[in-house]
Image: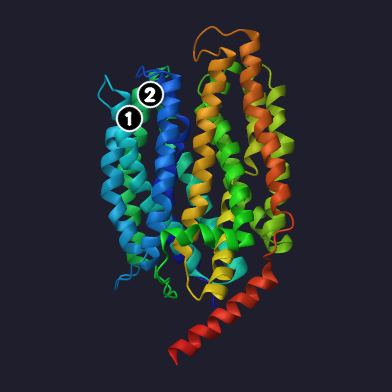
Amino acid sequence: MKPLSPSIVATFALPALPIAAMGLPIGVYLPPFYAGEMGLGLATVGTVFMLTRFWDVVTDPILGIVSDRWHTRWGRRKPWLVASVPIVMGSVMMIFMPSPPVTAAYLLGWMLVLYVGWTLLTLSHMSWGAELAPEYNERSRIQGYREVALILGMVLVLALPVAIERAAGGDVAATRIASMGWFVVILLPLTVALAVTLVPERPAHDAGHVAWRDTLSIVVRNAPLRRLLAADLLGGLSGGIVTSLFLFLAGDALKLAGASVLILVYLLAGVLFIPFLLRVSFRLGKHRSLALSSLFNAATIPFILLIPEGNLVAAVLCFVLLGVNVGAGPFLMRSIMADVADEDAVHSGSQRTGLFFSLLTMTNKIGSAVAVGIAYAALDVIGFVPGGENTTAAIAGLKAVYVWPACLLSIAVAAIVWAFPLDEARQRRNRQILDQRSAAAGA
């Protein structure tokens, strides 16, 4: 099959810009904003974000199963992508632009609505990307483009608060959060419209009926799926810890003003190295590349402990090093899951990409949800006070919670995926079987 043109792949990837522009503030900026400026407190906000993540986990497989069974003349992924737009826009405006005072019920309610829209948006987009091309390396290329768009979306949305902080001469939290919300509200309908208008959907095998009781049995029977979901769960836990604690690390432990600059250099390094990481995956295979990237994470994150307090240059150098690898795990996980869905299709006779990607997002969200709850509870236990006077022991505890769990979890991910059973040769055999079935059905 002829590779898709760069313009088609880039157009497909466009909705990832607002997806990332929404996801980064949810993980980094909104919890401290609602805990501090909105006055809800660390424990309350940690509980709310953990509960909403678990709600998101419940909706993922439901919407994944429905999207697999939904067929229209416009495709089965595009209608859900379009339907997500008004839900996301409305809930973003309520969450990113609150009118104080707010309550925990207000935050909880609107986060539940937002996660429904976000699940529709991300699940439809990822499943569509997995089905755009059947080839082993072409799938990595598509997901690599999408990862570049995701990182660029984070870079662009972060440029707004950096500009605001400099113009205002300080940290204007409410204005910063609102600017991020408007970025999503304006960009989302434009990018989705371009993608659904200009990028085709490939026909897929009918997914058939998947009963709720059968979803667990699918996971239990499929060894590659179990292994990938376990790795993604641990990756979500690791990423959730460092994401939720980043602002505290930068502001309270490292005493650095304008923490957004660190995230910007971190993400820019990730964008620059994705082409290199793609070439590595073409040469070594997806699962070995994923394992090596996890080991790289484990080896580099302890360098944070060496950053002197107030030393911006050392912090920038450290986060550039950490950012080299930021895109590897996500795009390789998604590319591998597309192959796992084909493996299932060979045995089941149905293409259940939506369900499989819903399970992938579900495990990552479980990890992230548990991470926020555990991390914020740990800060309470060690006596850490955001923005307040902290003891040397409390600062040391914050750094330890930030670094060592992520290090150990990354090693565990590498161990899980190193001997992953699906490689390029096996994927090629699976595609031959599926293509033969499709040709026979067409005849």
Looking at the rendered image, the quarter that the C terminus falls into is bottom left
Relative vertical location of residue 427 with respect to residue 222 in this rendering, above or below: below
| Foreground disc of the pair 1, 2 | 1
Viewer-side residue, 361 vs 187 = 361
Q: Is residue 155 visible?
A: yes
Q: Of all residues shown, which one is farthest toward the front? A: 213
Residue located at (50% from left, 76% from top): 349
Viewer-side residue, 348 vs 147 = 348
Relative vertical location of residue 179 with respect to residue 85 in this rendering, above or below: above
Numbered tag placed on residue 20 in the rendering:
none
Mark 1 → mark 2, Cα distance in angstroms: 8 Å
Q: Position of residue 276 (x, y in %)?
A: 66, 54
Secondary structure of the residue carrying tag 2 is helix
Residue type, numbered disc 2: Tyr
Q: Is residue 25 visible?
A: no
Q: Position of residue 16 (x, y in %)?
A: 44, 51
Horizontally, residue 101 falls left or right of residue 345, namely left
Q: Of all residues shown, which one is farthest toward the bottom? A: 443
Viewer-side residue, 346 vs 315 = 346
Secondary structure of the residue carrying tag 1 is helix
Horizontally, residue 107 falls left or right of residue 317, namely left
Q: Position of residue 143 (x, y in %)?
A: 54, 58
Residue type, numbered disc 1: Leu
Q: Which is more N-terminal, label 2 or label 1? A: 2
Q: Are marks 1 and 2 in contact (CB under 8 Å)?
A: yes
- Residue receiving disc 2: 34
Q: Position of residue 331 (x, y in %)?
A: 57, 54
- Residue receiving disc 1: 107
